[in-house]
Image (cartoon, helix red, strand yellow):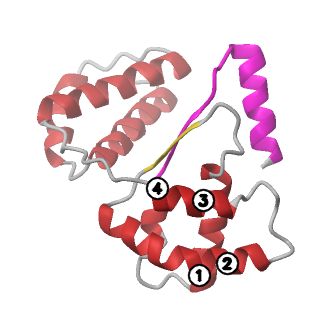
Amino acid sequence: YRRLLLWLELLARVEGCEGPVVILDEAENLYRPGVSRAERRTALRSLGFYCGGTIPRACVVLAVTPETLVSLREEAGELLDEIEEQVTALPQEDVAMLRRRLLRARPLDVKKLDAEQRRELAERVRIVHGKVRGRLDDPDWSAWVERAQKESKTPRELLRRAIERLERLAFVGG
């Protein structure tokens, strides 16, 4: 946690970063089949860090389905009680704050992205990637995006495919 806070402080001083946007979808994985109680408790400790207000100037978005939020609320009380009893819990893991925020959270409906929005998402990935790695020459980009946005089941899959393509081009040299 200290390294993360140091990194954020460096970004603030050197780059003028006003604070991170942290998007967490970890909670979805807390309840997948085969995840032990101990693993869920550990994940809740991490959520307690991120959602507990420890990261200065951060905007935290916890992306979960409404069903997962209900499950998280039901099980979180008992698991968070166990965490509060642990002497080894770091002070940054504010599980009491997480509990309060889970109870107050209200789900926001997020509409499915249409084809045009998915193409725009891929283009934004290309722009950000270009700022980091340098602009790449990819004459087939538009046709690739058209195919990829149709073949990708979720926006996340499209993002991963776009990043993989751009990284491959950056390292192979187009």
N-terminal of the pair, mark 1 or mark 3, is: 1
The mark that comes first in sequence, 4 or 2, is 2
The residue nearer to you, when weighing 130 against 7, is 7
Q: Amino acid at mark 3?
A: Leu
Q: Horizontally, is 78 left or right of 116 in the view?
A: right
Q: Earlier in the sequence, mark 3 or mark 4?
A: 3
What type is the residue that disc 1 sits on?
Answer: Glu
Q: Are marks 2 and 1 in contact (CB under 8 Å)?
A: yes
Rounded to the nearest angstrom, the CA distance separating label 3 from label 4 is: 10 Å
Crowding at dot 2, Cα within 10 Å, few <14 / some 14-19 / many 20+, comes out as few
The residue shown at (53%, 21%) is 133
For the C terminus, give its image quadrant: top left
Part of the protein shown in magenta: 2-24
Q: Can residue 131 be spotted in the picture?
A: yes
Q: Contact, CB < 8 Å: mark 4 with mark 2?
A: no
Do tag 1 and tag 3 residues touch (Cβ < 8 Å)? no
Kind of residue at badge 4:
Arg
